Image (cartoon, grey):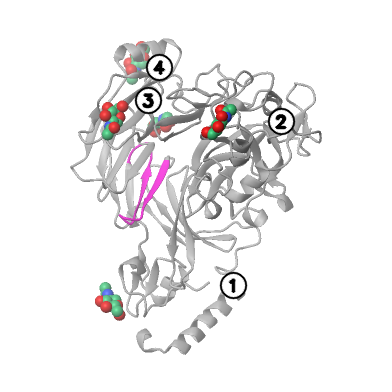
């Protein structure tokens, strides 16, 4: 019957739906406080098309997808796995056992660490090094080690390397790292007593953040990092930049006394080589700025950054960062999601600096004095080269002195739409991944996969500046945090790592909707009604369908 209705009848029908739902106020208009409820809840027993991998160990925290090879690499406790991306439960899975020795574990226990959770080799880093090898680091019972992995044979191919400069000792310490052109960039508070640090570890020159007289990072807790290839679209010969995301102790004067911590983004330039004398072996391009994610009308300031996802567009200008934020009060469950554009972040780094009059790091205010040339903290561009400054080594001393004392920017970075996309009470989100899909209307939609601390996965679509939560899925029988989320367009799958297993799910399950009404009202850009059933548009012809209309 649906198929026979002509186009105009359809439009009338959908208009009617729209009017009815506007009266209900849902789902077309998010409630005023943005506290959106998922439209569908799918319990563990109702999951469709779900595949699982579970080895003989725990903590499947780290996922690395290589779509071309159809492999999903997994870093766990004392082991690494190479799973088939098409089916993680396949028996073709390969394993590398890499646990700390009994001796090492005993030493760890002697240090007062917990031998039930901490004194193992928790894999914290796993990335591609070159076309044949991967590089990995593990905490190794509080004595970090790193090694190369031969990707083809899936075995450790080198002697173990000292990992203390690259990997934290503590398996639960905030940490992020990237391998870019065989150079390793990491950020963490590596040891209990050390200051947090952003490092370029290898090969030389090693670069670090400054600790005195101005400490650039204040008890920073890192959650993510991303390379933004800003050189590609630059007419000024700009450099690529690496962005780091973290929460740290607040340094600026704040009207809100309760806020001792703030969310930040810092950046460094890829070709930074440090200074010659001042800032020798230190970044000359380190700058940081505050990320704001607030509902000012409600006095809600989400100051703790829990996770970020970089959605890479065709250029840096249409790339975006998504962040999951929480409140500082640990006993209050609440989460917000904010989105930031790369250009808004650049705008903050191009703006005025902050200064601290005394060296006590408490009262930072806007710096209004003279700024030396070339602009402190900027990457080496054509403008520098025209003055004979080919590298950060050639930067004048007054510029380096300024950089050393002024790591913090005055401008704060507001999210797109000036407020969170989503705010939820009673939920702690842990991880997020985003991908884009072209809907039937030709528009590009951002689909968000959001994990919770209790093992739920929510799927949401961004419409203008709001999120509509299409569904929430209970991934595990036992509540446990979602530790990582990876999306494969090729496999049309989403992979989730958790303490007990790796789960693979289809990107969407349109067949769950049995009526045209449900299919359309789900507002799932993947799904459309073909006259008989709710189908996935990516695997069918689309001309006849009734899909989402916003
Ligand atoms: C590893 O899993 C155990 C068991 O669920 C959990 O208690 C522990 O916090 C996890 N450790 C890390 C580093 O994720
Ligand atoms: C932890 O250490 C205690 C004391 O040495 C020992 O009895 C226990 O078996 C150890 N547990 C594990 C899992 O190694
Ligand atoms: C990749 O790096 C490893 C470790 O340094 C090295 O042994 C291997 O030859 C390299 N492969 C290629 C193709 O360069
Ligand atoms: C910078 O590079 C230019 C061109 O390669 C060269 O002529 C100049 O001497 C270099 N300047 C310094 C300070 O190295
Ligand atoms: C989709 O439609 C085109 C043109 O109408 C047709 O040639 C093609 O075979 C169709 N594909 C499928 C999978 O039905």
Which residue was labeled with disc 4? 143
Between disc 4 and disc 3, whose residue precedes? 3
Q: Which residue is found at the position 72% from the left and 50% from the top?
A: 296
- Asked which quadrant contains residue 148, the reply is top left
Q: Quadrant of residue 97?
A: top left
Q: CB of residue at label 2: within 8 Å of ligand 1?
A: no
Query: What SS does tag 1 mark?
Result: helix
Which is in the foreground here, disc 2 or disc 1? Answer: 2
Element class at badge 2: loop
Distance from Cα at disc 3 to Cα at disc 1:
53 Å
Magenta residues, as a range? 484-501
The span from disc 1 to disc 4 (Cα, nearest Å) is 58 Å
Question: Is disc 4 surrounded by few (<14), some (14 to 19) or many (20+) residues within 10 Å?
Answer: many
Q: How crowded is mark 3: few (under 14 residues within 10 Å), some or many (20 or more)?
A: many
Residue closer to the observer: 94 or 450: 94
Q: Which tag is nearer the camera, tag 3 or tag 1? A: 3
Q: Name the residue under label 3.
A: 138
Say above or below: 28 vs 501.
below
Where residue 76 appears, x then y in whole percent? 34, 32
Q: Position of residue 94 (x, y in %)?
A: 21, 36
Residues under labels 3 and 2: Cα distance?
Answer: 33 Å
First of labels 3, 1 by sequence position: 1
Find residue 169 and report its image quarter.
top left
Report if the CB atoms under discs 1 and 4 are less than 8 Å apart: no
User: Image check: 537 left or right of 29?
Assistant: left
> Can you identify the residue that label 2 sits on?
251
């Amino acid at each position: 019957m649906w198929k026979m209705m002509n186009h105009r009848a359809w439009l009338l029908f959908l208009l009617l739906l729209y009017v009815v739902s506007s009266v209900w106020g849902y789902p077309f208009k998010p409630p005023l406080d943005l506290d959106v409820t998922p439209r569908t809840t799918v319990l563990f027993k109702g999951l469709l098309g779900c595949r699982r991998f579970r080895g003989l160990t725990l903590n499947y925290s780290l996922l690395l997808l290589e779509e071309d090879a159809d492999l999903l690499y997994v870093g766990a406790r004392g082991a690494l796995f190479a799973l088939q991306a098409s089916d993680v439960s396949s028996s073709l899975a390969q394993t590398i056992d890499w646990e700390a020795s009994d001796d090492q574990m005993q030493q760890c226990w002697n240090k007062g660490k917990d031998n039930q959770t901490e004194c193992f080799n928790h894999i914290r880093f796993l990335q591609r090094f070159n076309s044949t090898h991967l590089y990995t680091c593990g905490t190794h019972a509080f004595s970090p080690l790193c090694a190369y992995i031969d990707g083809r044979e899936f075995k450790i191919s080198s002697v173990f390397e000292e990992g203390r400069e690259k990997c934290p000792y503590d398996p639960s310490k905030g940490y992020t790292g990237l391998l870019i052109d065989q150079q390793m960039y990491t950020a963490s508070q590596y040891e209990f007593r050390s200051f947090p640090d952003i490092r370029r570890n290898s090969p030389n020159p090693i670069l670090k953040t400054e600790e005195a007289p101005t400490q650039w990072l204040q008890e920073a807790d890192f959650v993510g990092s991303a390379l933004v290839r800003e050189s590609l679209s630059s007419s000024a010969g700009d450099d690529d930049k690496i962005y780091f995301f973290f929460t740290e102790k607040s340094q600026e004067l704040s009207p809100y006394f309760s806020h001792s911590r703030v969310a930040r983004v810092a950046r460094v330039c890829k070709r930074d080589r440090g200074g010659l004398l001042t800032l020798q072996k230190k970044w000359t391009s380190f700058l940081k700025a505050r990320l704001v994610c607030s509902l000012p009308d409600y006095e809600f300031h989400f100051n703790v950054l829990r996770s970020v996802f970089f959605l890479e567009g065709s250029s840096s200008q249409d790339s975006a960062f998504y962040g999951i934020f929480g409140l500082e009060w640990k006993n209050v469950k609440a989460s917000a999601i904010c989105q930031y554009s790369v250009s808004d972040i650049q705008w903050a780094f191009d703006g005025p600096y902050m200064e601290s009059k005394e060296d006590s790091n408490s009262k930072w205010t806007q710096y209004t004095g003279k700024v030396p040339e070339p602009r402190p903290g900027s990457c080496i561009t054509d403008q520098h080269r025209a003055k004979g400054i080919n590298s950060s080594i050639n930067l004048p001393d007054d510029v380096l002195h300024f950089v050393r004392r002024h790591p913090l920017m005055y401008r704060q970075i507001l999210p797109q739409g000036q407020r969170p996309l989503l705010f939820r009470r009673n939920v702690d989100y842990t991880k997020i991944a985003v991908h884009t899909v072209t809907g039937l209307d030709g528009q590009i939609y951002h689909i968000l996969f959001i994990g919770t601390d209790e093992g739920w996965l929510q799927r949401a679509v961004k419409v203008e500046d709001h999120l509509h939560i299409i569904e929430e899925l209970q991934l595990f029988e036992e509540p446990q945090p979602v530790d990582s989320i990876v999306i494969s367009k090729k496999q049309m799958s989403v992979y989730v790592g958790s303490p007990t297993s790796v789960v693979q799910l289809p990107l969407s399950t349109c067949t769950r909707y049995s009526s045209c009404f449900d299919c359309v009202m789900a507002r799932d850009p993947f799904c459309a009604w073909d006259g008989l059933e709710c189908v996935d548009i990516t695997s069918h012809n689309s001309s006849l369908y009734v899909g989402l209309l916003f």
